Amino acid sequence: MKRVPLVLVLLLVAMSVLVTGPVAAQASGNGNSGNSFLDIALAGIKNPLISPCSSPGWKLIYMFVSNPGEEFNADHCIQFFAVQAGDTTQCPNIQRGAPMTKCYCLIASKKNDPSICDEVPSTSDPVAYLRVDCLWEVAIHDNNPAACTAMGNEKISRMFVGEMSQQTCLARLASGQGVGESTL
């Protein structure tokens, strides 16, 4: 996404929330129960934080703030607002496994709170993040050895990171290699 001044983003979000109300209210009588844009709009009525993601106004705004050719993605929109708010209760509104689990990881890292990693759900998505990915992100990004320790005996291997385990995590923190950088 292109860099846009925060004031402009807030103004655009406020405008999109205003547009969402009537659209979501009209949609509520449809009865559609799939994982559609309508479902997200209806969820926006119950949870205003994701309302911008269901707004036609937000889709219009997205055309101006995104990279050319980049399509609107409601899952990443919800993830963005959830992470900005630090609100894990929004993450289950994301339909696909990878962005949903990444939502928890990013919020845990933002708050430097390894306990949030216990909330990362299991999904059938083979590219979804796991609890150990979340702990690794908190440990490396926030230089938090407690997150390494919380890994216990869990370990996995990732293509660009290598083995993620308590031992390799603590060794990486001790070496300072990549500490302070995101691994997601």
Image: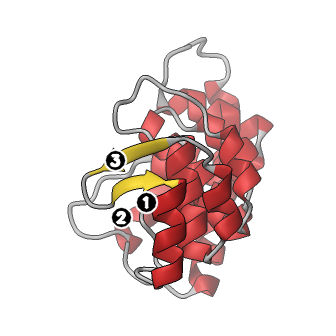
Instruction: Say if 4 sits above or below 132 in the image.
Output: below
Q: Residue at x 41, y 81 (%)?
A: 177
Q: Residues within 10 Å of mark 3 (few under 14, many from 20)?
A: few
141 vs 112, left or right, is left
22 vs 182, left or right, is right
Q: Hey, what amino acid is under mark 2? A: Met
The image quadrant where one finds the N terminus is: bottom left
Q: Quadrant of residue 65?
A: bottom left
Count the labels in the image: 3
**Residues marked 3 and 2 touching at CB (< 8 Å):** no
Q: Hey, what amino acid is under mark 1? A: Leu
Residue picked out by circle 2: 63
Residue picked out by circle 1: 60
Residue 108: x and y, percent?
Answer: 67, 59
Q: Residue at x 56, y 13 (%)?
A: 33
**Residues marked 2 and 1 touching at CB (< 8 Å):** yes
Residue picked out by circle 3: 157
Q: Nearer the viewer, residue 67 or 142?
A: 142
Q: Hey, what amino acid is under mark 3? A: Ser
Q: Quadrant of residue 69?
A: bottom left
What's the distance in space between the residues labelled 3 and 2, CA to CA?
37 Å
Circle 3: element type:
strand
**Residues marked 3 and 1 touching at CB (< 8 Å):** no
Q: Is residue 57 visible?
A: no
